[in-house]
Image: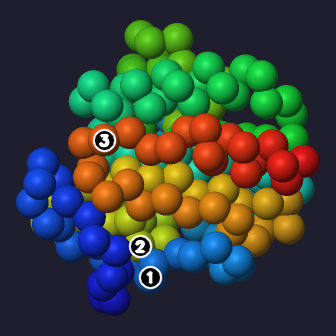
Amino acid sequence: MEKNKQKVTFKGNPVTLIGKEIKVNDKAIDFSVLNNSLEEVKLSDYDGKVKILSLFPSVDTGVCSKQNHTFNKEAASLGEDIVILAVSNDLPFALNRFCGAEGIDKIVTLSDHKNLDFATKYGFLIDELRLIARGVVVIDKDNTVKYVEYVKEIIEEPDYDAAIAVAKNLI
């Protein structure tokens, strides 16, 4: 499996990202993940919308929880042309529990746990931990990547404002 050349750390220690690094102006690669009801969902299910991919290791950490809360709050004001897909390797059951307990209802939480299809196609799989690295990818209505952030230190938050600004400009 190809190694991504992004330099990312977890608590100051370098980690290896597996998969092809996704870059601005790349054509978005379709992938398959599971929703909270264990149903297969594909990126192509959201064709015709601007897609913000919010990527995180686990809902059971403070930073990941904050990331989901922040994007959920933003999603409420973005309108129907933008969808936020929150992807992790958490089990669908954990994502469902988290959303119910935390009132997360404006973003779509998705699990890549089963096949790692997203993580390997977009270069976000942390080899040492089998978790998804923190980041954000924005994809336009024509499925071209317009913004990519691999957060350099996984325990830090992504640049929400930059990603939201790019998405809004694509409508």
SS type, badge 2: loop
Query: Please, what secondary structure does the residue beneath circle 1 have?
Result: loop
First-in-chain label (2 vs 1): 1
| Displayed quadrant of residue 56 | top left
Q: What x and y, as percent, mark residue 83?
A: 73, 41
Q: Compare residues 105 and 136 and report the one nearer the observer.
A: 136
- Give residue 20's mark: 1
Check residue 98 in the rendering and tell me which mark sits there, or answer none.
none
**Residue 28 is at least partly visible in this image:** no
Closer to the camera: disc 3 or disc 1?
Answer: 3
Horizontal side of 171 relative to 50 (left or right) equals right
Q: Amino acid at mark 1?
A: Lys
Q: At x 14% / y 66%, what residue is drawn?
A: 14
The percent coordinates of residue 36 (x first, y second) are: 50, 35
Q: CA distance from mark 2 to mark 3?
A: 19 Å
Residues at circles 2 and 1 in contact by the CB criterion of under 8 Å: yes
Secondary structure under badge 3? loop
Q: Is residue 82 left or right of residue 69?
A: right
Quarter of the figure that contains the N terminus? bottom left
Q: Which mark is residue 123?
A: 2
Count of numbered circles on the image: 3
Amino acid type, callout 3 = Glu
Q: Amino acid at mark 2?
A: Gly
Q: Residues within 10 Å of mark 1 (few under 14, many from 20)?
A: some
CB under 8 Å between callouts 2 and 3?
A: no
Q: Which residue is mark 3?
A: 156
Q: Is residue 2 above or below residue 62?
A: below
Residue 42, located in which quarter of the rendered image? bottom right
Q: Residue 80, image x and y in percent?
A: 86, 34
Could you say which is closer to the camera, residue 28 or residue 153? 153
